[in-house]
Amino acid sequence: MTEEPTLDKLPEEVFVALGRRGMEAIPLKECTYDCDGKELTLIDFTRAPDSISRKGVEEAREDYLVECDKCKRRFTIRCQIRYADGERMDTKVNIIDDKGKDLGWLGSY
């Protein structure tokens, strides 16, 4: 049975390294545009590949297409996940705007 995709799977914050000053938490589940909306609705979810072999180092990509409930603009939360022998090592998060432009790395978890 396949689990239904939800934003609850994502953490509330991702972290950015500040060099020798530690890490800074950045909210993940809020609008990336100027409206500062805090509520997002999941529109679509894609994952590639569908499964991992659980041997060696593998990568997967999950795209969460979301819409801000305040400004109604859409953007994609892209998670690039690295696995080692089936265990998640880390996840890098990028934001893709409504025109398909990669706005860059937001943080990791």
Image: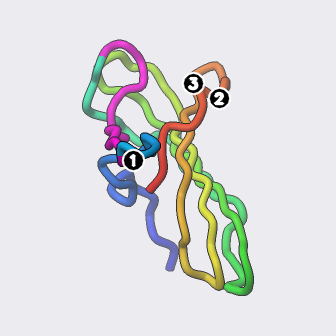
Write the residue at 61% across / 82% down. Answer: 86
Write the residue at 34% across / 41% down. Answer: 24
Q: Against 54, is 2 above or below?
A: above
Q: Is residue 23 magenta?
A: yes
Q: Earlier in the sequence, mark 3 or mark 2?
A: 3
**Which quadrant would the C terminus be assigned to in this image?**
bottom left
Q: Secondary structure at mark 3?
A: loop
**What residue would you read off at disc 1?**
14
- Most foreground residue, 33 or 44: 33
Q: Secondary structure at mark 2?
A: strand
The quadrant in which residue 38 appears is top left
**What residue would you read off at disc 2?**
102
Of the residues shown, which amino acid type is indicated by label 1? Answer: Val
Q: Earlier in the sequence, mark 1 or mark 3?
A: 1
Percent coordinates x, y for residue 106 in the rendering: 49, 37
Of the residues shown, which amino acid type is indicated by label 2? Answer: Asp
Percent coordinates x, y for residue 33 in the rendering: 41, 18
Residue 73 lies left or right of residue 34; in this view the side is right
Tell us which disc is closer to us: 3 or 2. Answer: 2
Q: Against 60, is 7 above or below?
A: above
Label 1 and label 2: CA atoms lie apart by: 17 Å
Of the residues shown, which amino acid type is indicated by label 3? Answer: Asp
Q: Secondary structure at mark 1?
A: strand
What span is in magenta? 22-35
The quadrant in which residue 88 appears is bottom right
Label 1 and label 3: CA atoms lie apart by: 18 Å
Dot 3 crowding, Cα within 10 Å, few <14, some 14–19, many 20+: some
**What residue would you read off at disc 3?**
97
Write the residue at 32% across / 43% down. Answer: 25
Dot 1 crowding, Cα within 10 Å, few <14, some 14–19, many 20+: many
Q: Earlier in the sequence, mark 1 or mark 2?
A: 1
The quadrant in which residue 5 appears is bottom left
